[in-house]
Amino acid sequence: MLETPIIPSADYSKVYEPAEDSYLLLDLFEQIRCELSSKRYAHSVPLVVEIGTGSGVVTAFLNKNILPKALYLATDVNPHSCVIAARTNSHNATSYNMDVIRCDLTSPLLTEKVDILIFNPPYVPAEKVPEIPKDDKDPRWLDLALDGGPTGMDITQRVLDSLHTILALKGEAYILFCARNQPDKVVEDFKKKSPGKWDVTMEIRRKAGWEMLSVYKFVRLCE
Amino acid sequence: MKFLTTNFVRCAVKSCAASSDSFPLVFSECQLVQQEQDFDAEFLTSMLDRLDWPALIKVAADLGNNSIPQVKPENIDPEDPESERILRDLHSLLLETQITEGKMICNHCQHVYYIKNSVANFLLPPHLAN
Ligand SMILES: C[S@@+](CC[C@H](N)C(=O)[O-])C[C@H]1O[C@@H](n2cnc3c(N)ncnc32)[C@H](O)[C@@H]1O
Ligand SMILES: [Zn+2]
């Protein structure tokens, strides 16, 4: 068992506390560690981007245990996450190769540069996606971590729709779903939109309380 | 935000994505702090491949550093003392230079983004959001 990163003094009323979904990603990366670390990337140093990094636990885990020679960029809309994620990383792993920016998904990133994309999204079905609070002290930042609109897919679907502009050729995305997102159907629709361009596989699945969580890998094939 | 990150970000406005004026952003009124980091020659050498050198020169100039070589160093051999000197300089610029406060401006739409407490904020106001 690889060590789970320690998160120094986070306030979990403001930042998403690592939970079963976070640990499912850690377990998956532990399982596929050899495959990932032996892989040749389009660029010699892979660019790893985590959307919605929260406490930063997933990025710190990868940087420490799986791909220490990668370049990491983590994003979050939540200003508290941006501070904590950087701190979690430097507490557990090297910090010269990691940075955090505050943005919506990957909106300021140059197109087709990302080799590995990771997203544990707000996947819980909820009436709507909360608006972004106006100031840092607002108590509602945490709502953004979970509520994903009627089928929990509002945010994830936006990422899927722009995945071809985010990922480099041969790049891969690891995205977490819950059963109520109907991932099978989502994947089928996704593949229908650009036949032959993607390889999509379910990598890991686990029951967590009354949720069934799964992580799918989306690989962008060479044209 | 680390200097290195400026080589990977452009204006977040969707209609600016296609314009070459949206990258690199123009950096202005920036405060910098040097933050000591482990030196990893191998990492830096392979990092070089990924860098957009003209963008790097431009941002360095915005921040008052005009001493970047005009062409990207090639055939770096970490064992060679001259190469090591180049790598150490790049290490200090790319990985140790932290922009703690400042503005980033898009040369296409003129939108201003802010860096505060070392965090660059690319969230857009509702009327510009994608
Ligand atoms: C389920 S939490 C996952 C946190 C962390 N990655 C983990 O696995 O423990 C979802 C995260 O996504 C962030 N988030 C929500 N909407 C976002 C958006 N549009 N862009 C970037 N991050 C977003 C939330 O603030 C939250 O930190
Ligand atoms: Zn712009």
Image (spheres, coloured by chain):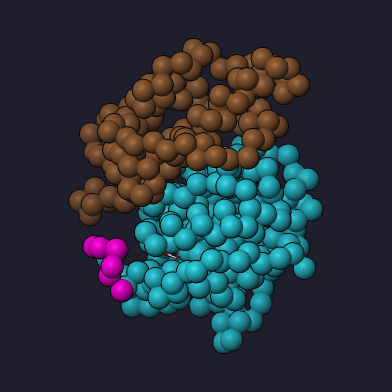
Chain colours: A cyan, B brown
- Ligand 1 sits in quadrant: bottom left
Residue at 73 percent across and 39 percent down: it is A40
Foreground: B34 or A34? B34
Q: Is residue A175 above or below residue B112?
A: below
Number of numbered discs overlaid on the protein picture: 0
Residue at 55 percent across and 72 percent down: it is A18
Foreground: B80 or A202? B80
The percent coordinates of residue A30 (x first, y second) are 73, 62
Residue at 75 percent across and 48 percent down: it is A37
The percent coordinates of residue B26 (x first, y second) are 32, 29
Q: Is residue A183 above or below residue A193?
A: below
Is residue B130 left or right of B99 when viewed as pictured?
left
The percent coordinates of residue A6 (x first, y second) are 61, 66
Q: Assign the N terminus of chain B to one quadrant of the image.
A: top left
Is residue B84 left or right of A185 when viewed as pictured?
right
User: Hey, which residue is sitting farthest left in the picture?
Assistant: B127
Magenta-tinted stretch: A134-139
- Regarding residue B22, the answer to whether it shows in the image is no
Is residue B115 left or right of A216 when viewed as pictured?
left
- Regarding residue B110, the answer to whether it shows in the image is yes
Residue at 71 percent across and 53 percent down: it is A66
Q: Is residue B42 above or below residue A200?
A: above
Quadrant position of residue A148: bottom left
User: Hey, which residue is sitting farthest top in the picture?
Assistant: B70
